[in-house]
Amino acid sequence: MNPQDTHPYDDIIHLPHPVSKKHPRMSPLNRAAQFSPFAALTGHEDAIQETARLTDSYVDLEEDWKELLDEQLQQLKKNLAQRPACEVTYFQPDRKKDGGSYVTVRRNVKKIEEHSRRIVFTDGTDLPIEQIFSIRGDL
């Protein structure tokens, strides 16, 4: 071997890899995480998706429609002993933005609470009467 063929690390190149006695070896997963891309705007993608999500507007019912609903509720009230099954469409406000969605459920009516203005179903769920859009079924 010629003196010109020597490299500056020849004296340490064949030594074993040093292992720290103080610090445990990093797991491959944690090591890989160091090189993962950095998301500078955390939550930005979620905010964009939330903005793009569509909601329905609440429809104010006309007086004749309100009267029809009131008649239907009175009919349900007369037949509560039979636990009438009905399909109720109601407006469910969105918790994150203006508007909401119209939801239809099919349930049996247990009672109508006039003081709290709620319709209670046999499964324990209840709805505010003001949010009901339509009622169909065993009236």
Image (cartoon, rainbow, N blue to C red):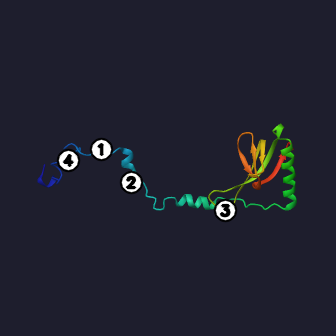
Q: Secondary structure at mark 2?
A: loop
> Disc 4 or disc 1, which is closer to the eye?
1
Q: Residues within 10 Å of mark 4 (few under 14, many from 20)?
A: few
- Checking the image for residue 35, the label placed there is 2
- Checking the image for residue 13, the label placed there is 4
Query: Residue at the front extreme?
Result: 115
- Residue 52: give x, y in percent of width and height: 63, 61
Q: Earlier in the sequence, mark 1 or mark 3?
A: 1
- Checking the image for residue 98, the label placed there is 3
Q: Residues within 10 Å of mark 1 (few under 14, many from 20)?
A: few
Q: Earlier in the sequence, mark 2 or mark 1?
A: 1
- Which three-letter amino acid code belongs to the residue tagged 1? Arg
- Residue 26: give x, y in percent of width and height: 32, 45
Q: CA distance from mark 4 to mark 3?
A: 67 Å
Q: Considering depth in this image, is 33 or 91 the residue closer to the camera?
A: 91
Q: Earlier in the sequence, mark 4 or mark 3?
A: 4
- The residue drawn where x is 11% and y is 53% is 3
Q: CA distance from mark 2 to mark 1?
A: 17 Å
Q: Secondary structure at mark 1?
A: loop
- Residue 65: give x, y in percent of width and height: 85, 57
Q: Which residue is mark 1?
A: 25
Looking at the rendered image, the quarter that the C terminus falls into is top right
Going by the image, does 120 lie left or right of 66? left
Q: CA distance from mark 3 to mark 2?
A: 40 Å
- The residue drawn where x is 76% and y is 56% is 130
- Which three-letter amino acid code belongs to the residue tagged 2? Phe
Q: Secondary structure at mark 4?
A: loop
